Image: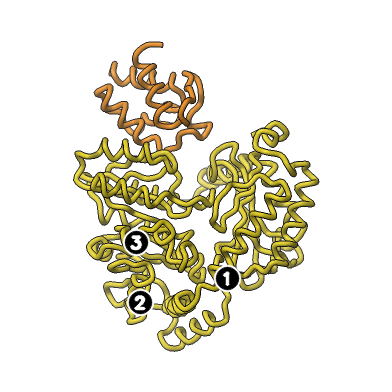
Chain colours: A orange, B yellow
Amino acid sequence: MDDLTKLVSNYIAKEYLVEGSEVTETMTLISSGIVDSFSMVPLKRFLEKKCNIKIADACATAEAFDTVQNIVALVRRVQNE
Amino acid sequence: MAFNEAGRSWYQAEIQAIRAAGLFKDERLICSPQSAEIEVEFPAGAAVRKCINICANNYLGLSSHPAVIRAAHAGLDARGYGMSSVRFICGTQDIHRQLEKRLSEFLGTEDTVLFPSCMDANAGFFEACLTERDVAIADRLVHASIVDGMRLSKAIQDSYKHSDMGHLEEKLQEHQDKRFRMIVTDGVFSMDGDLARLDEIVSLAEKYDAMVFLDDSHATGFIGKTGRGTHERCGVYGRIDAITTTLGKALGGASGGCVSGRRELVEMCRQRARPFLFSNTVAPVIVAGALQVLDLISASTERRDKLEWNAAYWRGLLTEAGFDIKAGESPIVPVMLYNAKLAQDFARDLFTEGIYAVGFFFPVVPKGQARIRTQLSAAHEKHHLDTAMAAFRKVGTKYGILGLGRKELIEKFGM
């Protein structure tokens, strides 16, 4: 697991899951109801702050935030823009 | 034609998608006053049938109380039907100010402003009172209208895990650099029926210099020894900065809501809250009824005491029968079924047995948390609850769920 994946996974586990639960890279977050559009706001802010990026609202879709894998891909895409 | 065929087709497809997802909401027509026993036409065109209602927010049984109806009639005669104006032009009567004063006295606050609904109060409050220099930190299970209100404001939005005080404290620490911090919570959470840990929230607010916002819609009138609300129950009466609540539930159940709290926050709502500024306020007939409701519940705790007894009795019956319920003390008692289809089928079968209850499932509640939400009323007599329980037992037996816990229910029906 690379550093970015670890960073996102740890944040999601701490922010959204009950203590002791683990998050996998492909576990669905939004479509399974773990994260909703309201609770997604701090996640977006966390990514912007930690990765020094700005995620456009148009990119902050349910699909882009649905798994750790998708979130990491989104961050990398924004970083490379 | 602006509404062209392409538009019609798109809307029809959307509505069909809502149906296909099992999310289409049908209205059942009630052909009687709201009460413990109602007459219902469902489906549309079917013969009207009598039912016991266990899903209304009529907590104190005042929706059709004779004294409230008499007061409403008198108010209609004395102050007319409508105002035909927003408040600040020519839409404020003496009785509107009387009701605001009475609500302040009841809730233990400095001032109150009425809104057309509590939805409007929540939608308007945050934009009026917070700016981009501030943060609102909400419990993740707050009502949808609070989420909408926070989104409409320029304040930074944050949230904490439901009732997790450790997580809230972390968020308060994180946001110490903001000008104002506001903790946002419901008093009684409408889907689970649990109470906010308001004493701990107030302690954290004092420790980290934050304001407290409380939506007490499912508590005002009956939670706490004299029914003042969650702040009374948790020993923090008089220490909440902003309370929103509704006249549309326990307090007569008609419509209307308010923001009640620190006078400066209330004044900011009068000056800047858009749902207040650009909409007529509560109609005089409802104000007159609500004043009577406050007279009734200030004079006696009889109704909230009966509601408390009913809730405890109903919880006991469900537990004894082997249903899996959410523990708590409020008159919101969720019967957990976990599976969405089972919840729908169960509610349909209860209706066949003459019991009006509704199944809730995703996205109203989290996935795998489907349930029948039952709600008690002071209008319920013991025989209503015994009859409802006989129906619950019959339907529960049909599906073989009595005595099953979460794990077994999920194994049997899936999530």
Quick one: label 1 or label 3, which is nearer the N terminus? 1
Q: Chain of mark 2?
A: B
Quick one: label 3 or label 2, which is nearer the N terminus? 2
Residue A79 vs residue B147, the one in the foreground = B147
Asked if marks 3 and 2 touch (Cβ < 8 Å), the reply is: no
SS class, disc 2: helix
Q: Position of residue A28 (x, y in %)?
A: 51, 26
Residue B116 vs residue A43, the one in the foreground = A43
* Left or right: where B211 falls relative to A16: left
* Left or right: where B110 falls relative to B17: left
Both labels 3 and 2 in a single chain: yes
Which of label 3 and label 2 is nearer to you? Answer: 2
SS class, disc 1: loop
- Neighbor class of circle 3 (other Cα within 10 Å; few <14, some 14-19, many 20+) is many
Q: Which residue is mark 3?
A: B275
Residue drawn at (36%, 68%) of the image: B114
- Tag shown at residue B61: 1
Q: Position of residue A50 (x, y in %)?
A: 27, 24
Which of label 1 and label 3 is nearer to you? Answer: 1
